[in-house]
Image (tube, grey):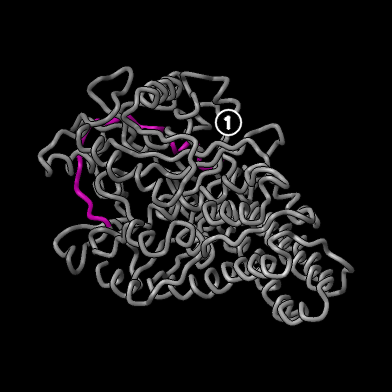
Amino acid sequence: MPADKSFYLTTPIYYVNDAPHIGHAYTTLMGDILTRWHRQRGERVWYLTGTDEHGQKVLRKAEASGVEPQAWVDRLVETEWKPMLETIDVANDDFIRTTEQRHIDGSKAFWEDLYARDAVYKGEFAGWYSVGSEEFVGDDDVTPGEGDDAGSMVSTLDGSRVEQVTEENYFFRLSDYQQRLLDLYEQQPDFIAPASSRNEIISFVRRGLRDLSISRSTFDWGIEVPWDDEHVMYVWIEALLNYVTAIGYGTDEERFEELWPAVHLVGKDIARFHAVIWPAMLMAAGRPVPHRVFAHGWLLVGGQKMSKSKANGIHPDELVAVFGSDAYRYYFARALTFGSDGSISYEDIHARYHADLANGLGNLASRVSAMIGKYFEGSLPAAGTVTSAEQAVIDLAATAVADADAAIEALAPQDALNSIWRLVDALNGYLAEQAPWKVAKEDLDRTATILATAAEGLRALAVVLAPVMPKAMAVLWDSLGATEAIGPLADQRIADAGRWGQLPAGTPITKSASLFPRIEESKVEESSAEA
């Protein structure tokens, strides 16, 4: 990515047919950690999320609830989706709703561009349609349902039920872009990641692409096709456009040029829309394709993909209420491999909370500040002679920061945290080995070196962990006296975090409240039972 370009990252926009669960929050959280890290690098960042509010699924849900679709989506957005961002402490720059005028205007402008370039034409669609996934499904991807779906036909792509539909539609000439897409995948090997999604997409495209129905004429909850008010835009085509309408497509060309292209984070079940249809649409409109499409895996509870229909859709509130937002953020970033399916449980969160956070990082910070208070009256002592033990910590800090930065660049937050935790573990091991509480009885100069080394390690950790646990690291930064001594935490740069010796001697060190207080198992068991 050119140095003068912004880092523009998006989540999918989420259907507002129901309240969010942690599967939705997962994508948004990972995007937040990545963009916070890029901000900590000092880069210009724009982070977009939002809601998808049109389509037949939303319309039917609103009708079933006895309200107008606009009233339905307004209520859910304000009472469920936006509050979720606050619950998990997301610092998004923008929130796009597809019922906003800017999206409507930009979408119409994009369609006019496609129409002017002869990329769309009118025809008739007769075939299978999944309301659940708002997707047209080919005959080869439909099979008789089993179990609860017995008597219905289902999509082999995602298991949703399909219906026979016959209607007049506009079509996008997707078949024209088969070879151009294959060339894109070959020329930019990291355009789709991880490898499992890349291989699946390439296989899908090689099977052959058919022109795609991109409008609906049997209901009116959507954006009208600019030149034909009897048709509304097919919800997926309209939804994909949010990535450009939010940054000025059709309304502010200068801003669009400044921010586009983007890195898209998506669930693996919608990778085909983003890595096949979306780049083809952009090619047709004469615009650059995205930098990258990264498809993460599913969150599994009891071995099943999370969903409201299976009653395993845990709301983020349920976990944050027990563990706090920082521990929530840490768990999903560390315990799961971004790009693969991952199982979660209350018991695993509880175990990691105490092992990594309460007993690991939290206890480290508490012990260091307490000993500086006890032996040096709360004033950071000057380090003396550096031995091989200190040098090992200094070298590891530089390496861990560099490795973590490289992992973030590769969209692997779990690897970044693994690298950072090598420093947490090393500092705890260093204190246990050096035993400053014993050394203090005979050699305060040596004690000063040990505690100054540990405090400097905590400074480095506060910088690189701020994107993951912003609240706790702000407390740690203040307890180290770093705001006054060095400057605001937000102004510290990742590239400089591993540089040793930034906390000056004499800095007042205070013992804060526990960063991660212990949580009784009974509280976890109670929350798990309620869920």
Q: Quadrant of the C terminus?
A: bottom left
Crowding near the residue tagged with mark 1, few <14, some 14–19, many ≥20 C-alpha atoms within 10 Å? some
**What residue is rendered at 65% in x and 43% in y?**
488
Q: Which residues are magenta?
A: 160-180
Please provide percent x and percent y for residue 407: 65, 58
Judge whether residue 128 can be spotted in this image. no
Query: What is the secondary structure assignment of the residue under circle 1?
Result: helix
Q: How many numbered dots are placed on residues in this image? A: 1
The residue positioned 18% from the left and 69% from the top of the image is 147
The percent coordinates of residue 184 (x first, y second) are 60, 43
Residue displayed at 22% across by 32% down: 70
| In this view, 302 is above or below 472 | below
Please tell me which residue lies in front, 369 or 423: 369
Q: Is residue 85 left or right of residue 73?
A: right
- Asked if the stretch drawn in magenta spans residue 140, the answer is no
280 vs 417, left or right, is left
Q: Position of residue 95 (x, y in %)?
A: 42, 35
User: What residue did someone put label 1 on?
Assistant: 259
Q: Residue furthest right?
A: 385
Question: 204 or 409, which is in the foreground?
Answer: 409
Residue 161 magenta: yes
Instruction: Tell which residue pokes out farthest to the left in this image.
Output: 66
Task: Kindly identify the residue that appears in the image at 46 percent across and 44 percent down.
Answer: 11
Q: Is residue 67 visible?
A: yes
Q: Give the quarter of the figure containing the N terminus.
A: top right
Amino acid type, label 1: Leu
| Percent position of residue 445, x then y | 84, 71
